[in-house]
Image: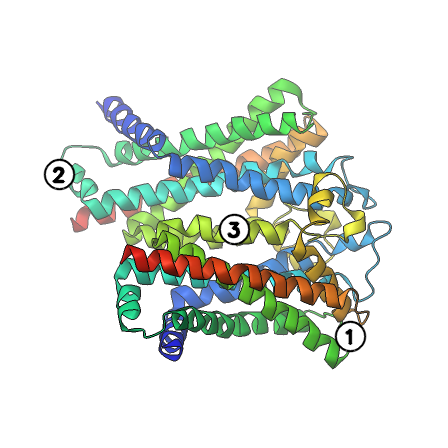
Amino acid sequence: MLFTQISQLSRRSVVRLLRQPQVIAPALMFPLLIFGFQAAGLSSAADIPGFPSDSYVSFLLAFPLVQGTLFAAVSAGTDLANDIETGFLNRLSMTPMHPVALLIGMLAGVVSLGFLQSVVFIIVGLLVGVTFAAGFLGALVLIVLTTLTALGFGGVGAILALRTGSGEAVQGLFPLLLVTFFLSSILLPRDLIETDWFRIVATYNPVSYIVEGIRSLIITGWDGQALALGFIVAAGLIVVGISGAVLSLRGRVART
Amino acid sequence: MAGAVAWRGIHNFFLNPALVIPAILFPLFFLAAFAGGLSRVSDIPSFDFEAGYTAFQYVWILLQTVAIGGAFTGFAIARDFEGGFAQRFMLAAPRREGIIFGYMIVSLVRVTVTGGVATVAALISGMQVLGSGVDLFGLLGLAVLVNVAATLFAVGMAMILRTSSGGFLIQTPIFVATFLSPVFVPLELLDGWIKAVSKVNPITFILESGRGFISGNPTEVALAFGLGAALILVMIPWALFGLRRAEKAG
């Protein structure tokens, strides 16, 4: 019963995503555009003494992968807010639908988008000469880590959508996520960040560990510690995002 | 008419936290991420900028802020068309070009505030200014030219599209033009396609001249001001074309 509910709502969520090229196109193009500018403009950063890679493009491939998950979060939240604004969620809450099924089903779209983004960004990376130090298997692990991160951020987007019920408020989350993203080790390794306060913020910023987990598969190979930290942070994000979203959903359904 | 448009736009901007807060935060965020996070980029061999990396980045951030300020004015115009307010303005205006002038005043006022906040933040974070007062006026002059050109572009695009969903088309060309320049390192340290594109991008010349002003070593000043003026001259017919399209649409 629960599985049927999840599969039906997941199907709706994925179909809705596929029918919105205006959502998919920016989610793919915008991170690639910024990646292109940053990689080209900062290519000589690989000459900084102590830089961990010969190629800044390889170093920076984590950029579109993680930034894409932020787009996915906003997309998931906006879709859910749209369901609230149009009354779809209220109608579903009148049915014997399980709240967890409702949430997981709705987040299926964000997982699909995260997966699609990972595959596309990896292909683009290969086309521009990035080689994966951890090989083909490493690329697969990278896709899993990125998709899990998208799910976690999707949960955060869902919390905001359920709390506010407003697509506009969810859109307002994006600048905050973007700041969190840039105040990490996304552009330079933490040990090469000279400004003290920035390095401290980047060290306490969980996004740094997701970035470093993904990056390790591209430029280092199999780095157990970086990968473990990346997956732990992604798992933590999922736990916080989903449990927070379930609680918010219960609160919203109770008010209906 | 221009005064009425300007007063309304300025009033709406400063009294709406959803508009004013992101407009102030974005330049600060760029300053933190690029000047703070990337300061080791100045250790790249052959990177030579006497005023330091914060000043190097500040000039780009200032120009980007004033250019994006123009784009945001375009968003406001698109919203005014969606709400029907712009149409009422057009009915009431004896000379509709005044509407464009009014939006340009709005844009200049808002970037005076956002650019001013970015400047104060850069100075607090230890930016060195080696240029004289006259040099800094030169930098501000370039920023005004970029803002006017970007605003005219955004006005034209917004009056053609007349919908908020066209925001991507208003913002992206401005965003791309500012990034297709030597953002992180001087032009001579770029290579590949970005160098080829940067060498023909007018923004590059304005940016390099602005960096010359802040480091007390003005370079290619006439060329930079000439290109800024040329951008405005190109964008005036574009904005008027947008206005005529909006008039025809009724």
Q: Are marks 1 and 3 in contact (CB under 8 Å)?
A: no
- Callout 2, which amino acid? Met
Q: Residue at x 19, y 40 (%)?
A: A88
**For mark 1, what is the residue?**
B131
The answer to which of A105 and B230 lies nearer the viewer is: B230
Q: Left or right: B106 with respect to B86? A: right
The picture quadrant where one finds residue B124 is bottom right
**For mark 2, what is the residue?**
A94
Residue A103 % position (x, y): 30, 36
The answer to which of B206 and A59 lies nearer the viewer is: B206
Q: Residue at x 38, y 78 (%)?
A: B7
Label 2 marks which chain's residue? Answer: A
Label 1 marks which chain's residue? Answer: B
Q: Residues within 10 Å of mark 1 (few under 14, many from 20)?
A: many
| Mark in front: 2 vs 1 | 1
- Callout 1, which amino acid? Gly
Are labels 2 and 1 assigned to the same chain? Answer: no
Residue B16 % position (x, y): 37, 69
